[in-house]
Image: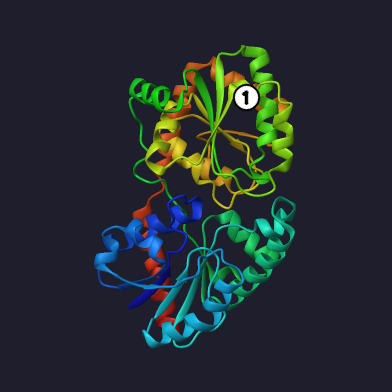
Amino acid sequence: MKVAIDVRTVLPNRSGVGNYVLNLIQNLRQVDPEPMYYFLAQKKNLSLLGDLTRKQNSFLTLFSHENHPLSDFWEHFILPVRLKRMEIDVFHGPASLIPFRKDHYGLVVTIHDLVAFLFPETIPLKYGAYMRYLLRQAVKRANRIISVSEHTQQDLIKILNVPSEKITVIHEAPSPIFRPGDKDMVQSHLKNRYGISKKFIYHLGNIEPRKNLIVLLEAFTLVCRELGNEYQLVVSGQKGWLIHSLSHFLKNYPMRDQVLFTGYIQMEDLPLFMNGAEIFVFPSLYEGFGLPVLEAMSCGTPVISSNRSSIPEIVGSAGVLVDPTDIQNLAERIIHLLRNPAERMRLSQLGKEQAARFSWVEAARKTLDVYRLVKDSDS
């Protein structure tokens, strides 16, 4: 079986989708070395794939995944010709996009979320309209859809009328680098490298409206009023879109000196932040999966997170779930956890047990089953 996979989202400063793709392809061959994999990549991707590029084939394009509409023209009209010439059996678009044309190969697409439909106000207007068009076409033309959560599956059924039998739910998992570490060593490293000298509350995610950071900052103000300046809020993530409201809010934010925006953090340092934090807080308005909460739980860090979208499915009973619009309640739950080390210890253990239920090996195995299903049905 010949499988082509689009890996253009595996970038040096990658976020959730890029990490999903990298973890998936790293585990596919471990599950079954028999299929031949071909990577649709750019030159800048190859060094990040490491040994995979020597064991497997790649074919290159000049266009990045985000180079709309040139990339889309190439993907829909040029790529199908190449896939046919290479005698590909299955093409997998793991970042929600696939060619509109197919010829003697099956199409698999992974849908991570439907934020363009559910929260269009949190993304640029033209981009949102274009993504809604592309997503409608992708779910229509795919032989099989991989959804990263049960919640996203239900969104696909309700919003885009996708038949449930066309969807396979395959959960993501935390990378093995997220595991409990020595807290004293971690805190020493964070102090020396990032200047974090206080106990801190941590948040990780791209800086964009959907992450609900203004509510988190408002809640942190109430925390500081109750507990003084004992704690710091640390926020990591690269700047996304529509951050004008947040920038304006921060100009007059009274606790600005207590908040550290680190910008993008390289993957190898993220476990240090997760382990160093007293608690991880993630009041997102909408997530297709919510991988950061799972990464925090893998490190044994107690989690306070939103009770919306897919997050309750991922967290289960191993974290504190709150209404992400209720500033007062969010602050109260943060204060309660900070004041109760026994409760933090309990949630730490529950979190590690919950995170252990998610496996990239299992995700790769289920993804291979989808490839085989599509190949057999398309042959």
Q: Is residue 38 above or below residue 195?
A: below
284, 74: nearer the viewer? 74
Asked if residue 99 shows in the view, the reply is no
Q: Which colouring convention does the figure follow?
A: rainbow
Give the image location of residue 124, x and y in percent: 71, 56
81, 164: nearer the viewer? 81
Q: Amino acid at mark 1?
A: Arg
Q: Is residue 194 left or right of residue 330?
A: left
Q: Is residue 211 left or right of residue 203?
A: right
Q: Is residue 295 above or below residue 147?
A: above
Image quadrant assignment for residue 229? top right
Asked if residue 33 shows in the view, the reply is yes
Q: Is residue 56 left or right of residue 139?
A: left
- For disc 1, the marked residue is 333
Give the image location of residue 35, x and y in percent: 29, 73
Q: Is residue 299 above or below residue 225?
A: below
Secondary structure under tag 1 reads: helix
Q: Residues within 10 Å of mark 1 (few under 14, many from 20)?
A: some
Look at 68% across and 26% down and name the residue there: 219
Look at 36% across and 36% down and name the residue there: 179
Locate the C terminus by quadrant: bottom left
Give the image location of residue 376, x and y in percent: 40, 81
Locate the N terminus by quadrant: bottom left
Give the image location of residue 86, x and y in percent: 36, 84
Look at 56% across and 13% down and name the residue there: 230
Q: Is residue 54 left or right of residue 251?
A: left
Q: Is residue 202 above or below residue 104?
A: above
